[in-house]
Image: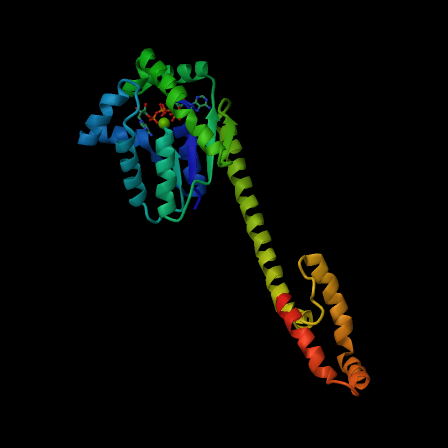
């Protein structure tokens, strides 16, 4: 799944870019601001609650927002991925989202952050306030409050994803098309890297499998380990020994014959040799 957090301050262009990204990548767009506004319009209890916060430029409490967001995800079981626009806005929301996605065997792929200076944000929101009916765009004080809340409560979410290596900042000033292309570049690069990594890990696995299948060769070493493995405390020593062992085991019959011949008059050399070999063999395992 491709799960994107589209991050940025009020007026950064999250909604504008989301609309384009969902078309290109076939994702489901989840904007908590849009869902709250739809509820406000519908006069639902959730809408009434959200309105009391939104009109003042404050965040709707975490508990309410998290529940609502999760319910929206569940409603889209066939989604190829999501764009989370305006969520998470607090560290608590980010943690909750991670946990929730984990239960669904997925995770956030990347956080794309639109970086726009405050002066530009104020200009954009004031302009929209004149044209649209968004109450929180009408009053400069409420606009400033939204920006302040973003700096105080939402900015830490950047660190949260940075720590996971998922934060990618993009300059959010310029034409909508240029910004869109910059976002797509990051998404596409990430996908290529992922594919390459997957292919590489497949190769590693197959090499490991090959090694396993050729392993019987070491069977000889296993047997011969028993012979001179008096001091096999470290790997280098073991490797050196196994070389010696190979040489020794190359002519086992001839050596035994010699030993038997030399010892014949007194004791059974074969038994003596066997006694010496056994304990050393166990030690070496
Ligand atoms: P939300 O609806 O998310 O509003 P926001 O974060 O304040 O951001 P906007 O939607 O105003 O801006 P945007 O970044 O989407 O930019 P857009 O594309 O519209 O949240 C509203 C409220 O709901 C919050 O204040 C809070 O109370 C509550 N809420 C929401 N989520 C919550 C959560 N997770 N937890 C708690 N409370 C939550 O563009 C803005 C304007 O700029 C447009 O007019 C656009 O045409 C223009 N524009 C876009 N791109 C460019 C460009 N490149 N150049 C020039 N103009 C541009
Ligand atoms: Mg928006």
**Quarter of the rendering containing residue 264:** bottom right
**Quarter of the rendering containing residue 258:** bottom right
Quick check: 86 above or below 147? Answer: below
Residue 49: x %, y % from top left = 21, 26
Quick check: 165 above or below 243? Answer: above
Classify the position of the C terminus by image quarter: bottom right
Q: What colour scheme governs how the chains and residues are painted in the rendered image of this protein?
A: rainbow
Quick check: 184 above or below 127? Answer: below
Q: Which quadrant of the figure shows ligand 2?
A: top left
Residue drawn at 77 percent across, 76 percent down: 250
Residue 29 visible in rendering: no
- 104 left or right of 221 in image: left
**Viewer-proximal residue, 186 or 203?**
203
Residue 110: x %, y % from top left = 47, 37
Furthest-bottom residue in this view: 265
**Viewer-proximal residue, 157 or 80?**
157
Residue drawn at 37 percent across, 23 percent down: 153
Residue drawn at 43 percent across, 37 percent down: 4
Q: How many marks?
A: 0
Residue drawn at 42 percent across, 26 percent down: 156
- 12 left or right of 276 in image: left
Residue 283: x %, y % from top left = 63, 66
- 164 left or right of 127 in image: right
Residue 178: x %, y % from top left = 52, 28
Quick check: 283 above or below 23? Answer: below
Residue 127 visible in rendering: yes
């Amino acid at each position: 799944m491709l799960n994107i957090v589209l991050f940025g301050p009020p007026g950064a262009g999250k909604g504008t870019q989301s609309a384009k990204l969902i078309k290109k990548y076939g994702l489901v767009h989840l904007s908590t601001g849009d869902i709250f506004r739809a509820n406000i319009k519908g006069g639902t209890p959730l809408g009434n609650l959200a309105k009391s916060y939104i009109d003042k430029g404050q965040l709707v409490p975490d508990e309410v927002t998290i529940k609502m967001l999760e319910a929206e995800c569940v409603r889209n079981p066939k989604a190829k991925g999501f764009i989370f626009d305006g969520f998470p806005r607090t560290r608590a929301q980010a943690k909750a989202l991670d946990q929730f996605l984990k239960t669904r065997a997925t995770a956030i792929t990347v956080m794309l952050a639109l970086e726009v200076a405050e002066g530009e944000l104020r200009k954009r929101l004031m302009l929209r306030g004149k044209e649209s009916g968004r109450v929180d765009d009408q009053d400069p004080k409420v606009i400033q409050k939204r920006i302040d809340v973003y700096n105080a409560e939402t900015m830490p979410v950047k660190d949260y994803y940075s720590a996971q290596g998922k934060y990618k900042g993009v300059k959010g000033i310029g034409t909508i098309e240029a910004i869109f292309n910059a976002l797509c570049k990051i998404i596409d690069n990430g996908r290529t890297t992922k594919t390459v990594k997957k292919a590489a890990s497949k190769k590693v696995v197959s090499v490991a499998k090959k090694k396993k299948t050729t392993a019987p060769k070491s069977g000889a070493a296993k047997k011969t380990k028993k012979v001179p493995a008096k001091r096999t405390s470290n790997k280098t020593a073991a490797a050196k020994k196994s070389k010696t062992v190979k040489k020794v085991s190359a002519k086992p019959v001839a050596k035994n014959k010699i030993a038997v011949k030399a010892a014949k008059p007194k004791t059974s050399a074969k038994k003596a040799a066997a006694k010496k070999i056994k304990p050393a063999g166990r030690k070496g395992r």
